[in-house]
Structures are given as structure tokens and as C-alpha cells.
Amino acid sequence: MKEKTSRVNIIQKRKRKAAFVKWIRIAVQMMFLVLIPAVFSQAFGAVKDIAETIGRGESISWTIFTTKFAVLCLATMVLGRVFCGWACAFGALGDWLYQIGQAIQKKSGKKLPVMPEKIQVILQKMKYIVLLLILVICFFGETQLIAQFSPWTVFSLITSGGEFGGYKYSIIAIVFVMIGMIYKERFFCQFLCPLGAIFSLLPQWSFFKLKRNQEKCIPNCTLCKRNCPVHIKLQEEEYREGECIMCGRCKYGCPKNNIKIKMK
């Protein structure tokens, strides 16, 4: 009886800790959304500028956007994709829309169809195609096409208080993405984000890394994978671990406390 009570207390303690981390993460996301919502667009603006400059055969110049991109890349290599999981304004929007979608489904008693894992893994490759397409368009000097069709154009204009009436295709794009965000967690981040594609390809020098003690795992348990917004299981699919956004949900959702943040 005492053992059962102790186990229940441990589970409740971990649930409280998970809830605490969740609200801390939301607070950090809110702070970045209010103070610096355009970091994504500015950092990726450097990537587009570099591709366009190379296409013109000119020397690449260092700008404030290049600095922001370099800082985010360095932070990603050292700390993992913490920007994606904790600071990206568009990622935060996706998290909140997905939670709204889940609440509506729970209230109505009607569930949307679940995306099969194989489909999800395949669709995660789409962001590399999006990145390549954008680089090619910028290389040939057609950067204005990106602004016309990018969901980030409207989002940036909304957060900065600008006018976006002339961007009808961008409006259609952000509506499509927001519907996707309601249906699938981290829809844009997983399947369409070109900056996420770059971050996932960066070398992993992380001083802090999530590690799973596989020997102590409950047989056939997939709770960490089911809790993961990008659907990975640590040290099971190493080729996909670049997708990890360091949200910590696997760590705080593990019933055996087998996932730790290890320091190299």
C-alpha cells in the first residue's frame, strides 16, 4: 500500500513539475512575441540576402540581420534548437492554436483523424524542399515572390502594425498554415519552416543534451514519443534528432524519470 501511495505521489509531483515548465515556457514565448517577434524573419532575411547577393555575383556584406542569423545558429549548435522550442513567435502561435484545437475537440467529443507516423516523417522532409526553392528564387533575384506568398509576411506586418491588404496570397498562406497548426502540433515548424531546416542540419555541439536511459525504460513504452511535438524518441532515430526543439516534454512526461539533461 505504501509503495503504491509513494508511486502516486511521484507521478503527481512530476505532473506538477511538467505543468510548471509548461507555464514557464509559455511565459518565455509571450515575452519574445511581445518584445522581439521578428527575429525569425530578420534572421532568415540574412539567408535570402546571401543567396540574392551570390546570384548577382557580388561580395557578401555583413549586416545586423546576418548577425542575428549567426547568433541563432551558434545558439542552436551550443544549446540545441531552444529558439524553435522557446523563443520563436511563429512556433508559439502554433502551440497555442494546437491547444485551442485540442480543447475544441475535447469539448465537442469529436476527434480529428490522427496523422500516421510514416506520413509525418515524410512530410518533415518538405521543409528542405521549401528551403531549396526559396534559395533558388532568391539566387535569380525574384525575392519579391517570397514576400507575396510567405505566411510570415502577414504575421510580421500584424505584429509590427503594418498594412497587409496587398498580400492576398500571403493571407491565404497564413490561413492555410493556421488551419494546419490547429490540426497538427508544430505544423509549420515540422513541415514548412526553412529556418528550421537549416537548424536541423547544423552540427550538434550542444553542451546540454537530452539523454534517455534505455535500459530502465518500460518495455514497449512510447510515451515520450507520443508526448513529443515532433514525434521522435531519443537515441532510437538519431538521424532525426536534429528535429528536437528542446521543449522538455519527453523529460517531464517520462513515468520512470529516465530522460535527463546531460552536460557534456
Image (tube, helix red, strand yellow):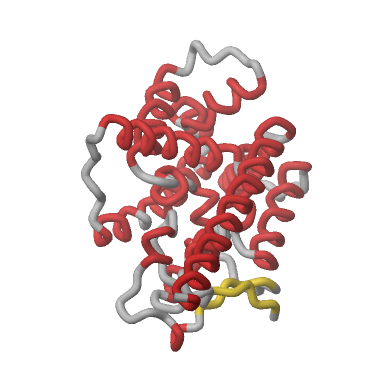
- Viewer-closest of 76 and 19: 19
Which quadrant would the C terminus be assigned to in this image? Answer: bottom right
Is residue 177 or residue 26 the one in the foreground?
A: 26
Q: At 54% across and 68% down in the image, what residue appears?
A: 10
Whether residue 164 is visible here, answered yes or no, is yes
Outermost residue, bottom direction? Answer: 215
User: Residue 42 appears in which quarter of the rendering?
Assistant: top right
Q: Nearer the viewer, residue 41 or 9?
A: 9
Which of the 4 quarters of the picture holds residue 1?
bottom left
Q: How many marks?
A: 0
Percent across and percent down for residue 94 are: 48, 39
Q: Residue furthest front?
A: 1
Q: Nearer the viewer, residue 11 or 20?
A: 11
Q: Against 102, is 222 above or below?
A: below
Image point 40% across, 44% down: which residue? Answer: 187
Report x, y in % for residue 54.
60, 49
Could you tell me residue 89's position as x and y percent? Answer: 60, 38
Q: Position of residue 92 (x, y in %)?
A: 55, 40
Residue 182 appears left or right of 213: left
Q: Is residue 227 left or right of residue 248?
A: left
Give the residue displayed 69% in from the left and 38% down from the top: 32
Residue 84 visible somewhere in the drawing: no
